[in-house]
Image: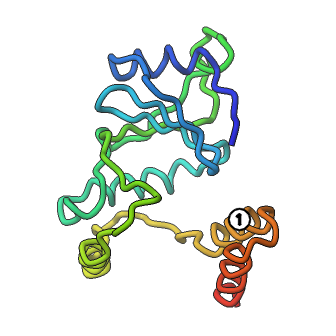
């Protein structure tokens, strides 16, 4: 999905990480990902709840989940300064939040033989591990995310794969 990335954001991520971004990605979530060497700066979509995001960062950084979840490089949420978006040098923030992550290799979407067994082991370990005490996790938001994903699939048209996904998704929504 096309999204305009302000030039100031490139400068800010360079200052934050010490490396200029080599790629700017805009996934359908509305986030912006700046790949800066071995660091990925994720600027979360407008309206992201800071307390919920901070709780998720604490969980991702928990030692018990090492090797299951990617651990953030910083355990705190970074406010995006207004100057990064509109050049306002007054020290104010935009309300947008950023997090810093290690750059990791990801699986291609068209891989012929996905590592299902390894993925299942990782998922099982995740579900066996209790959330850290006092993590302050809020609701996971899965129903709303499912609804948004199904709306995106519905816009793809009547392709048989889309119809199958919509049928399965709608049965899950009940």
Q: How is the rendered protein coloured?
A: rainbow
Residue occupied by mark 1:
148
- Of residue 58 and residue 73, the one placed in the foreground of this image is 73
Instruction: Determine whether 32 is above or below 12 in the image.
Output: below
What residue lies at 29% left-to-right and 70% top-to-bottom?
A: 115
The image shows a total of numbered marks equal to 1
What residue lies at 51% left-to-right and 32% top-to-bottom?
A: 79
What residue lies at 74% left-to-right and 79% top-to-bottom?
A: 163
Q: Quadrant of the C terminus?
A: bottom right
Question: How busy is the neighbourhood of tag 1: few (under 14 within 10 Å), some, or many (20 plus)?
Answer: few
- Of residue 28 and residue 129, the one placed in the foreground of this image is 28
Instruction: Determine whether 174 is above or below 31 in the image.
Output: below
Q: Find residue 66 and report its image quarter.
A: bottom left
Horizontal arrangement in the rendering, residue 131 relative to residue 87 (left or right): left
Horizontal arrangement in the rendering, residue 131 relative to residue 43 (left or right): left
**Where residue 40 appears, x then y in whole percent?**
39, 35
**Where residue 114 appears, x then y in whole percent?**
34, 68
Horizontal arrangement in the rendering, residue 149 relative to residue 55 (left or right): right
Horizontal arrangement in the rendering, residue 130 relative to residue 88 (left or right): left
**Where residue 125 appears, x then y in whole percent?**
24, 76
Instruction: Determine whether 27 is above or below 12 in the image.
Output: below
Instruction: Determine whether 27 is above or below 64 in the image.
Output: above
Q: Find residue 146 and report its image quarter.
A: bottom right
- Of residue 17 and residue 121, the one placed in the foreground of this image is 121
């Amino acid at each position: 999905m096309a999204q305009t990335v302000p030039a100031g954001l490139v400068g800010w991520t360079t200052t934050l990480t010490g490396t200029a971004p080599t790629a700017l990605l805009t996934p359908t979530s509305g986030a912006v990902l700046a790949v800066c060497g071995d660091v990925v700066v994720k600027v979360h979509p407008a309206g992201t709840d800071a307390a919920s995001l901070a709780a998720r960062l604490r969980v991702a950084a928990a030692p018990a989940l090492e090797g299951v979840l990617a651990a953030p490089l910083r355990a705190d949420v970074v406010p995006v300064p207004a100057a990064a978006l509109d050049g306002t040098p007054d020290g104010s923030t935009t309300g947008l939040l950023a997090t810093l992550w290690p750059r990791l290799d990801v699986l291609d979407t068209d891989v012929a033989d996905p590592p299902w067994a390894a993925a299942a082991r990782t998922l099982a370990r995740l579900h066996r591990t209790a959330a850290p005490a006092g993590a302050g996790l809020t609701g996971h938001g899965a129903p709303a995310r499912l609804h948004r994903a199904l709306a995106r699939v519905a816009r793809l048209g009547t392709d048989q794969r889309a119809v199958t996904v919509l049928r399965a998704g709608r049965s899950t929504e009940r």
